[in-house]
Amino acid sequence: MTQNDIRPRTDTLSRLHPLDNPARSSLTGPHAHFAESRGRVLRYPVDVTPWIALPDNPEAQDWADLAALAGPGGSVALAAFQAPPRDWEIVFRGGGVQLVDASVDAAPDPEAVLLGPQDVPDMLDLVARTRPGPFLPRTVELGTYLGIRRGGALVAMAGERLHPPGWTEISGVCTDESVRGQGLASRLVLAVAHGIRERGETPFLHASASNTGAIRLYESLGFRLRRRTEFISALVPAVFRSAHGT
């Protein structure tokens, strides 16, 4: 039996809004075809995105299942309301914000081009230079990615990541230093938002709470704060015993 053969149990409690646990809403909804599972724990493939989807109220066995998925010493990215057991080492903790479309003037952009698997080397190179957050070799499969090229070089991009029912996250927003100040990021965010709206869905996004410049930009485009959150990266203990002693 593989980890994908283990069917998740139903959550004992369900949050009221799909954006409260967006990774889980995605992996039990439109992104279910990406889901790798063990017990009630879901995750994306490790070359797609690091998002982990725990139940809203994880129990001891859920942490054991996550440890089995990640492996001893493995790193996992968590939302703060799912704080790990005390013997898990927290290696990163940072504040974040979740913003939703309130009055975004979404519009297509004539210079934006659709990016696909053939563009991944250029996308990874741009991400390495600009560090917008995790972007992996298969992240492009999560949704539509748009870019702007100048002289053949990819200098800006934005795209779609998490996909809770009725919502799509805008992510991977980055601009090369050589073209900053030209409004390319704003144009691409509005273009990606336009595509999301065309499907009858609502755009949202996450940002680091310390990235006040990006937050001001998104708010100027018509996004509003929905909630503050906290992101944690933790390491699975090198020796882990599950609730059943295995």
Image: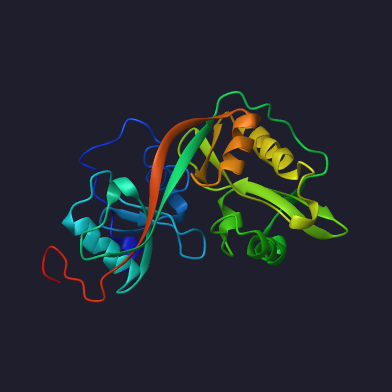
Visual colour scheme: rainbow
48 left or right of 178 in image: left
Q: Residue at x 76, y 49 (%)?
A: 180
Tell me: residue 101, above or below residue 245. above
Q: Residue at x 28, y 43 (%)?
A: 56
Q: Position of residue 73 (x, y in %)?
A: 32, 74
Residues 79 and 40: in front is 79
Quadrant of the rendered image containing residue 141: bottom right
Q: Position of residue 228 (x, y in %)?
A: 41, 38
Whether residue 144 is visible here, answered yes or no, is no
Q: Position of residue 87 (x, y in %)?
A: 21, 66
Quarter containing the N terminus: bottom left
Q: Residue furthest right?
A: 151
Tell me: residue 246, above or below residue 80. below
Q: Position of residue 125 (x, y in %)?
A: 69, 66
Quarter containing the C terminus: bottom left
167 left or right of 27 in image: right
Residues 72 and 37: in front is 72
Q: Residue furthest top?
A: 103
Total marks drawn?
0
Q: Residue at x 45, y 39 (%)?
A: 164
111 left or right of 104 in image: right
Whether residue 195 is visible here, answered yes or no, is yes
Quadrant of the rendered image containing residue 184: top right
Q: Residue at x 22, y 63 (%)?
A: 64
